[in-house]
Amino acid sequence: MIRSLVTLLGPAHAPRLYRYLAWLVTSAVLQGLAVALLVPILHALFAGDLPTAMAWLAGLAAMVVLTCIAHYQQAMKGFALALLVLTTLHDRLGQHLVSLPLGWFNSEKVGRLSRSATSGTLMVTGLFAHYLGPVVSGVVVPATVALTLFVFDWRLGLTAVLCAPLIYFTHHWSAAAIGSNDARVEAAATLAGNRVVEFARYQQVLRAFGRTQDGYAPLQAANQAQKLAGGSMLSQTFPKLLAGGLTVQLAFALLVGVGIALAAHGEIDAIQLVALLALAARFVGPLAEAAARSGLLRMAGNDLDQWVGILREPPLPEPAVSQPLSAPGSLAFEQVSFAYPSGPTVLRDLTFNAPAHSMTAIVGASGSGKTTVTRLLMRFFDTSEGSVKVGGVDVRELSSEALMAQLSLVMQDVYLFDDSLEANIRVGSPDASARAVAEAARLAGVDEIVARLPQGWNTPVGEGGASLSGGERQRVSLARALLKRAPIVLLDEATAALDPHNEAFVQAAIRSLMQSSTVLVIAHRLPTIMAADQILVLDAGRLVESGTHAHLLGLNGRYAGFWHDRQRAGGWRLNAQAQPC
C-alpha cells in the first residue's frame, strides 16, 4: 500500500508521506510504552511503596506528554495529506488523462473513472484522515505491549506473541473477503451507472420501439445485480467481522488463563497478576479497534488501487523533439498492420499515399478497417507493424500538439457542448476573429441556422447539441474544421445519414475544404466518392483496389459491384462518365 500511496501523491510529496508514517509509528510505540508503565506503578502502589510509585508516575506523565505530541503531529500531517489529495488529485488526473492514447477511453473505463473521481476520492482521502491511524496503532501498540510483557513475564509475552499469527491471519482473511465483496459491489455499481446514462441518453430510440413501457431490461438487470451484490456484501462480511472480533477476545481470554495459572502455581503474586492483566487488556483493545477498521481500510484500498491503476496507465509515447514536416499536407500508410488489444487483426499490410491538396475516398464493407485508418492517423493507437505518416513524418515522431495541429476530424456522430452555437464553432480555433467564424459558418451553411435561432449566435445548443437536428450538428462540425484550417481533414461517413438539404451544404463545405486541405473521406454517398482523386477499396483490412472512379469501374471488380449496388439501392442511375458534383 505504501508504494501505491507514493504513486497517488506523486514523488514530490513522498517525503511528506514518510514523515507522516514515522510520526504515526512513533505515536503508537509511545502509547504502548505508556501503557506498560502501568505495571510498575500498580505493583508499587499495591506493595505500599509510594515513593517508587510516584517516580514511575512521573515517568508515565512524561511519556504521556511525548505521546500527545507525537499523536498531534501524526494527526495534523494526516489531515494535511488528506487535504493535499482533495486539492491536487483531480488536477493530476486531468494532466494524466490528456497524455493517454485516445483509444484508451471506452465506456467501461470512463464509468470506472467517474466513480473513482467522485466517491473513490473521498475513500482515498479517508485513508489519511480516518483509517490508517487506528489500524497502524491497532497493530503497533499491541506489538509494543507484547514485547514489554516479555520484560515482566516471559510466559505471558510468549502467549501474546503466539496469539499474533492467529489474529493476523483471521483479520487478513476478513479484510480480504470484505475487499473482494467491495470490488464486486463497485463493478455492479459502475455497470448500473453506465446503464442509467445509456437509458437516459437514448430515450428517442427506446421510445420509438416501445422499450420503455415494460422497463429497460439491461438497466433492470444491472440494478438487480447491484442489489444482489449489496446484499451479498452484508451477508458475507458480517460473519467475518464477528470472527475477527472473536479471535481478539479469545486471545485476551488465553492471556487471562495463563496469568491465573501462573498465579495459582505461585509463579507470580496476585498484585503482579492484576497489573499484568491490565496490560493484557491494552493488548487486545487496539486490536479490536483495528479489526473494526480493517474492512474500511481494505475498501479504501480498493479505491486506491483503482486510482493507482489509472495513474499507472502508460501515456502515449512522445518524442523528445517533434520532427519537422518534410511534406506538409500529405499522409501515407506504409505496410501497416494493426490489431486492437485482445482482438483480431483489422488491417493487413496496408500501403497508400495521399498527396497534399488531394481527396482520397475509402470504401468497403462494414468491418473492413475504414474507421481504423482514421484512428491510426490520430494516434488513438499505434500500429502493430509499418508506419503511418503525416506531413512526411511518422506520427510517432510528432508531438501530440504537432500532430493535432495537422488534423481535423468530422465524424458522423457529432458531439456539441452545452454552450452557445458560436462557442461550439470556436472549438476549431478559439482565438479566431468574428469575421473568420462568420465565413466558416457561411461555407458550412450554419449562417442559415443562425438566422432562424431565437438568440442567433448566442443560442444554447443543449447537451450534445440536442436542440439541433443531426444534419445541423454536422454542419456545425464542418464549420469547426473550416475554422481550424488544418492541412488534413478526416471525414468519417460525414454524409451517411443526411437529408438532401443538409447534404447539399455538407458537399459544398467539402469542396471548400478541398481547396485548402488534403481530404480523406470514408463515404457511401455516390457524389462524394466520385469527387475523389483516388478511391481505396478495403476488404478484410487489405487494399484490394485503388484508382479513380472511371478506372475502378473499368476493372469491373469489387468497386464496380459496390457502385452498382449503391445505384440500385438509391433507385437512380449515373453513367460512368458522370462528372463530380
Image (tube, helix red, strand yellow):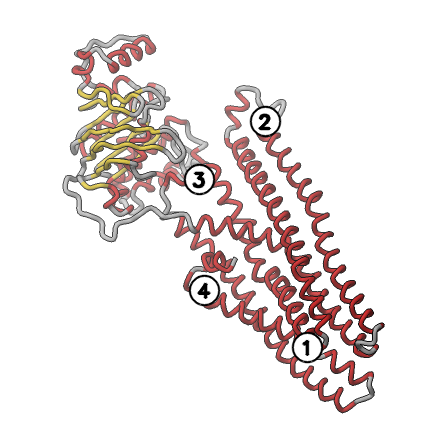
Q: Which mark is residue 418?
A: 3
Q: Earlier in the sequence, mark 4 or mark 1?
A: 4
Residue 416 position (above or below residue 317):
above
Q: Which mark is residue 151?
A: 1
| Circle 1/circle 2 CB separation < 8 Å | no
Task: Report how far apart the C-alphas of labels 2 and 4 lie in the structure.
Answer: 48 Å
Task: Report how far apart the C-alphas of labels 4 and 1 lie in the structure.
Answer: 37 Å
**At 54% across and 31% down in the image, what residue appears?**
199
Q: Name which quarter of the figure residue 75 lies in.
A: bottom right
Give the residue type that dot 3 points to.
Asp
> What secondary structure is found at the residue carrying circle 3?
loop
Q: Residues within 10 Å of mark 1 (few under 14, many from 20)?
A: few
Q: Is residue 552 left or right of residue 384?
A: left
Give the residue type that dot 4 points to.
Ala
> What secondary structure is found at the residue carrying circle 1?
helix
Q: Earlier in the sequence, mark 2 or mark 4?
A: 4
Task: Report how far apart the C-alphas of labels 1 and 2 lie in the structure.
Answer: 68 Å
Give the residue type that dot 1 points to.
Val
> What secondary structure is found at the residue carrying circle 4?
helix
